[in-house]
Amino acid sequence: MPRVSFVEIPNPSGFKIESLFRDNNFTVPLYQRNYAWGKDEVKDFWDDLQDIIEGKRNSHFFGQIVTFKNERGEQEIIDGQQRLTTSLIFMSAIRDIAIKLGQRVQGTPTDINADDEIGDTLRMIRTQVRKSIRGTKDDQPSLVVQQHVEDQYSDETLEDFFKKLTHSRISENDRKTSSEPKKNMFNAYDDITKWVNTSIKSEKELGAQIDHLQTIFDAFFDHFYIVMISAPSRQDAFTIFETLNSRGKDLKASDIIKNRVMSLMYEDLDNANQSWNKITSQLDNNSDRITRFIRTYWASRYRVVSESRLYREISDKVSTVVEAQKFLDDLSSLVELYTVLESPTSPKAHYNYFENERLTQQLDILNRLHVLLYYPIVLALEHRNFSESDKLTVVRKIISVFIRFRTIMNRGTNKLESGFSDVAHQIWSLNLSNVNAIIDYMDEHLLPSNNQTKASFEAMTKEGGQRGAKKWTLVYLLAELYDAVYDDFDDDTLYQRTFSDDNYRLVQIASNPELEDYVNYFGNWTILEKNLAKMDFKTMAQLITALSQSNLTANHELATQLQNADWNIDTIKQRQGLFTSSVVTIW
């Protein structure tokens, strides 16, 4: 269980949205997580509002917020910024729709009294929104979000961006952004605008549409309420947040872990937050990626834990300022490498991360096979300053283990994930201090035996495909085996021709019903240059002609075999058996 100090939680105060923003100035401190609500959460918000509009409920509890009133009189939001940010985005969308309806009113000939009445309705909506959002003249905005959230396309802070969004100053150029919180804000605004417009267009007359807009706004403004807990100190607010959210049901693990680290480093909060932001900016401030990175780091340093248990595991071991600083230092030193493992060849900086090009190529092969479980080992090697040549040796052994364990024998990933984590932990702890010890350990604990591998390979089936991991798995296996048996490739050309240039297309030799389950046997697949395999082959004669024109000796042998004998279950098994002895040599 997380070690938290329990504090007496202050009596909460209940607020309708109307008074919440009127009576408080909120700020999202730099150390807080960014805006992370996606379509599902915003849709839940809209569905709850619909229940009020349709009279299914009289009121809606929008949730709790935990704050601390700082020395400037602002309510620092420790928990609840997603709800408050969404509230202002919603009101901004309502106001902008009201403005467009107002333009329609001005251009529509109507009875002057009716015109005044519906104009007053729209002005009242805009006035209420303006008083809630504030920040247009000399008054302070009701909500200030974080600054210094990096965006490769813009130097504009998240606070400035949010202020533009909530004050009708967003342009189409502003939508070009890699910042996850900015994109989330945009998407929330767009979705809400779409849903509100769809709802009001159920009314045919302009006046009725405006009345319906007023109904939607009033449902939110007057019937949503929030409970606010304002703690007597920032440290108490951290502890209340951790106590209320220790199971992380509504938060990503990374969000509550951040709170844990910041609460421990309270005396040096600015530097701690700056370190955190440098880490997370490299992961596009994406909570899912940040959580995966932390989970990978933890698997490297200690052991594999599920995302649901990650926070509790970390809170048990990271309980002092020194441990929190070590945690941040480790993440800072490894985050760039982690992003390279996610995408080894793109952008160009990733391709140039290692001086050893062969290492980059082997990592790219793993990436194309959609292998992620090995990340902890490479992080541990980096942490212990192993050379790139040693890393290459270990990565090649990782490929051998994966090909035997998962691709050929089809064993479950849980054991392999735990096994790779164990190897990483042994490296991190210096129990495995040199590359020979690592290879021996992996051979002993993870690598299936030659006999097991051969027996499984003889009956191995693969579905194939023209893209993704299924394609690349078969292409890789065939290229390596063609190199070993027919000398069709070498170390300098296999990666370039097969992966970088993507020269080959998977071809299933036959698919007639008589083959039954053997249609997907490995022996029934080959690779063929794309210029020779632009379309599916309708006859065996067409395939034989294309195989004969291939630059691969393996395909010439196959063409001869197809010319001289029927292609059936026995010939598929025979061809598959031809490769069996080479499998344990390569991998």
Image (spheres, rainbow, N blue to C red):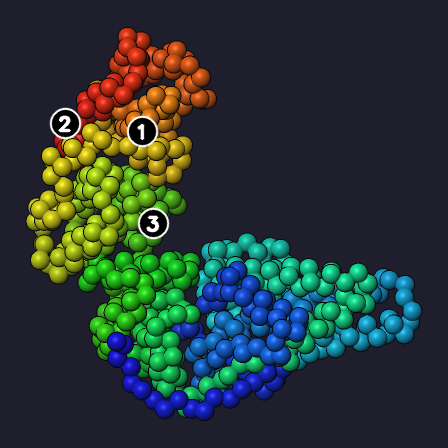
Q: Amino acid at mark 2?
A: Ser
Q: Residue at x 38, y 38 (%)?
A: 468
Which residue is at the front of the view, 469 or 349? 469
Residue under label 3, please give it: 342
Q: Residue furthest right?
A: 111
Taking 255 as reference, is 141 above or below it? Answer: below
Q: Give the residue drawn at x 10%, y 44%.
A: 443
Is the Cβ of the residue at disc 3 closer than 8 Å to that at disc 2?
Answer: no
In this figure, which residue is indicated by the disc labeled 2?
Answer: 581
| Front disc: 3 or 2 | 2
Q: Position of residue 423 (x, y in %)?
A: 15, 53
Report which residue position mark 1 lands on.
Answer: 517
The residue depicted at 58 percent of the width and 58 percent of the height is 174
What is the quadrant of residue 507 in the picture? top left
Instruction: Give the residue at the far top of this rendering.
Output: 564
Residue 143 in percent (x, y) is at: 55, 77
How far across and how far down the image is residue 477, in percent? Answer: 26, 31
Q: Is residue 290 left or right of residue 65?
A: left
Residue 544: in sight, yes or no? yes
Residue 514 position, x and y percent, is: 34, 21
Q: Is there CB contact under 8 Å for labels 3 and 1?
A: no
Rate crowding at label 3 as few (under 14), some (14 to 19) or many (20 or more) other CA atoms within 10 Å: some
Of marks 3 and 2, which one's residue comes earlier in the chain?
3
Quadrant in which residue 428 is drawn: bottom left
SS under mark 1: helix
